[in-house]
Amino acid sequence: MKLNSILILFCLTASVLFTACKKKIDYPAQPNSRIESFKVPVSDGEISGVIDESDKTITVYLPFFYQLDVIDPKIKLAEGAVLKEAVVPVEVMDTKTTYTVTGADKSSSTYKLIINIQQITPLVLDEVSTAATTSKWGIGNGFITVSGNFNTTDVTKVKVYLVGADGKEIALVPSASSTTGIAVALTPSGKTYRLGNLQVPQTVDPGTYKLRAKVYSLVSEAKYPVEIVYGRPTVTYAGVTAKAGETFKIGTRAEVFHQFSEFSIMVKGQKTVLPIISYNRTEAVIRVPEEVPAGVYQPTLKFEGWPASAFGWTVTVTPK
């Protein structure tokens, strides 16, 4: 091919390419139903949510150290757009919140909110049992302590559960003891945090349970289980008063009544049994025999499998 022919061909090709590059392409108009910004106020400023228009999600990366229970977002919409839902505080563990936006152009979009709490992983729950020894906790026991790397001194952020064979979670609750002042106390010791004064609920059945802890979205389960048993009941009162021939009630806020076999007092040096009319796990009905004279007596209670004990409170019997 001659040089002139090559130059002519090159010029024609360049002319075509240049013409093609100058062609204007019109992109489809974006719908007006858009969330343009999603911000979460925090103690030192704002956290901006990441808006993904391709899958209509808003992801908020929330550092754990803020220890928020809820976020109270500020939402900016495209001009002329309106939001179907009211903007209200959202719990940080919520997974169902969506926002539906209607644009001025009558288009509609629904965004799903995703809250990603950034925590130190993994969560570790310290063992309370070993391969050789299984810890025994009494039903109603209000002095349970668990520990781990919870990385918080806020007791409301740590949840501890017994998990039965059916997989059902039973939350340990703050102790009902009135002597602690603070029902639940969480104190750091080095890199370990101890959550104390937890109580095994009085409704729990005896058996072997796994131990599980949760801190926000993190979950940890102890390798070795605990055994829940009937403990020795503790009945603490300032005292009760009843007339001869009448009944009175006693209750327990800690270990439950189980195999409650005897309630007695000493009358003139002689043991006198007061009949147990009925009882359940938390309450018992006792009757004072009509022949018991008026007076103040210290009772002794007996539960099968435990020594009979006096708990330091009194029964005052008044005349009929």
Image: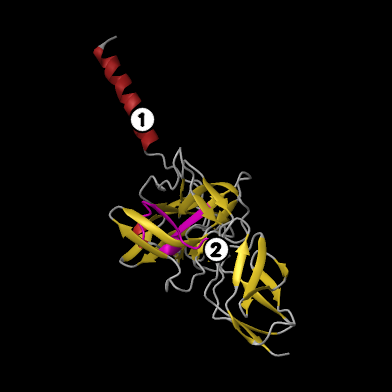
Q: Is residue 159 magenta?
A: yes
Separation of residues labelled 2 and 1 (CA atoms): 40 Å
Name the spot of residue 153 as percent of width and height, x first.
Answer: 36, 62
From which residue to which does the magenta span run? Answer: 141-161
Front-lying residue, 266 or 101 = 266
Q: Residue at x 61, y 51 (%)?
A: 206
* Magenta-colored stretch includes residue 177: no
Please say if the residues under marks 2 and 1 sit with CB atoms less than 8 Å apart: no
| Nearest-to-viewer mark from 2 and 1 | 2
Quarter of the picture containing the C terminus is bottom right
The mark that comes first in sequence, 2 or 1, is 1
Q: Name the residue rendered at 52%, 62% in the picture.
A: 173
For this orientation, the residue located farthest to the bottom is 319
Question: Which residue in the protein does label 2 denote?
Answer: 104
Quadrant (top left/top right/bottom left/bottom right) for the N terminus: top left
Q: Whole-percent x and y of residue 100?
A: 57, 59
Q: Secondary structure at mark 2?
A: loop
Task: Name the colouring of the figure.
Answer: secondary structure
Q: In which quarter of the view is residue 248 placed?
A: bottom right
Q: Nearer the viewer, residue 78 or 234?
A: 234
Using a 10 Å C-alpha cutoff, classify the residue at mark 1 as few (fewer than 14 neighbours), some (14 to 19) or many (20 or more). few
Pinpoint residue 181: horizontal percent, then vertical percent.
Answer: 42, 74
Residue 9 lies left or right of residue 155; in this view the side is left
Q: Is residue 22 above or below residue 308?
A: above
Residue matched to label 1: 17
